[in-house]
Amino acid sequence: MARRTYDDSCGIARALDLIGDRWTLLVVRELLLGPKRYTDLQTALRRIAPDVLAQRLRDLEAGGLAERTELTGPGRARVYRLTDRGRELQPVLVALGRFGSRLPLPEHPEELTPDAFAVALLTVFRPERAARVSIRVGLALGVERFMVSLDDGRLAIGRETGDQPSALIETTPGVLTRLLWHGLPLPDAEASGTLRITGDRSAAETFLRVFTTRLEPTA
């Protein structure tokens, strides 16, 4: 079946020909911080039909935005990852996240996926709040682990690479969402057993202060 097109020479229209189909940008969101297996994508995108996910991945491959590869190590899992061209969509997703964070939440909002939460950190980040801050904090959100690096107003987030962080925060996206953006006190989260900090506590608290806002991200 031929792909639909706007048949419009405008750059926006041509971009939407490639990434404007339903679910496409959410697939990109889940791949933005590192590769994932097909089953991981299916789990994260809870409501996507298997045939739709397969088609969106084929479209991203055909457009040069994603590729299949094989991870080294035990199991040699086959994964999808963004190409350099696909990673150019990061500022697009961040801008959409900032725009969407000011829109009403769904009536019954579900917890963000770990990757959606990590991308949400990009949308709310304010460099001036991290001036003269230099820390590396690990986030263990269920089975997903990320490294957040702050370096004098610069932010980098990626999947954990094995490097040792200054501090590790183990929790869920839902707890961190409430802690950072909805007023949940840190002592309450720790007392409930839903959040645990190991390593340099001052680094973890600095990370939380940098990202604490009243925005409601919906990346």
Image (tube, grey):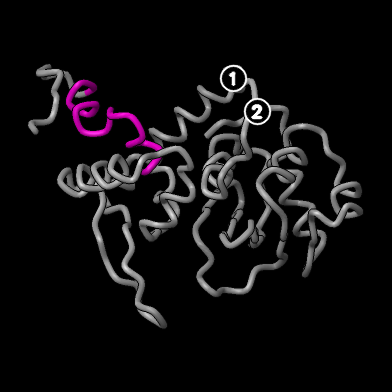
Query: Disc 2 marks which amino acid?
Result: Glu
Q: Residue at x 50, y 22 (%)?
A: 99
Crowding around mark 1 (Cα neighbors within 10 Å: few <14, some 14 to 19, many 20+) is: few
Question: Is 155 positioned to the left or the right of 89 in the image?
Answer: right
State how far apart marks 2 and 1 are (Cα): 7 Å
**Residue 16 placement, left or right of 166:** left
Q: Is residue 148 in the magenta section?
A: no
- Asked which quadrant contains residue 24, the reply is top left
Instruction: Classify residue 164 as left or right of residue 36.
Output: right
Numbered circle sitting on residue 216: 2
Magenta stretch: dominant secondary structure: helix
The percent coordinates of residue 189 (x first, y second) are 85, 49
**Is 20 within the magenta?**
yes
Q: Residue 60 location in percent, x, y?
A: 23, 44
* Residue 39 percent coordinates (x, y): 40, 57
Q: Which residues are magenta?
A: 12-27
- Give the SS element for disc 2: loop
Q: Which residue is mark 1?
A: 102
Quadrant containing the N terminus in the rendered view: top left
> From the viewer's perspective, is 105 left or right of 22?
right
Q: Along the line of sight, which residue is nearer the eye, 213 or 26?
A: 26
Q: Secondary structure at mark 1?
A: loop
Going 54% across and 74% down the picture, which residue do you hit? 162
Q: Quick one: which residue is furthest to the bottom in this view?
A: 74
Snapshot quadrant of residue 101: top right
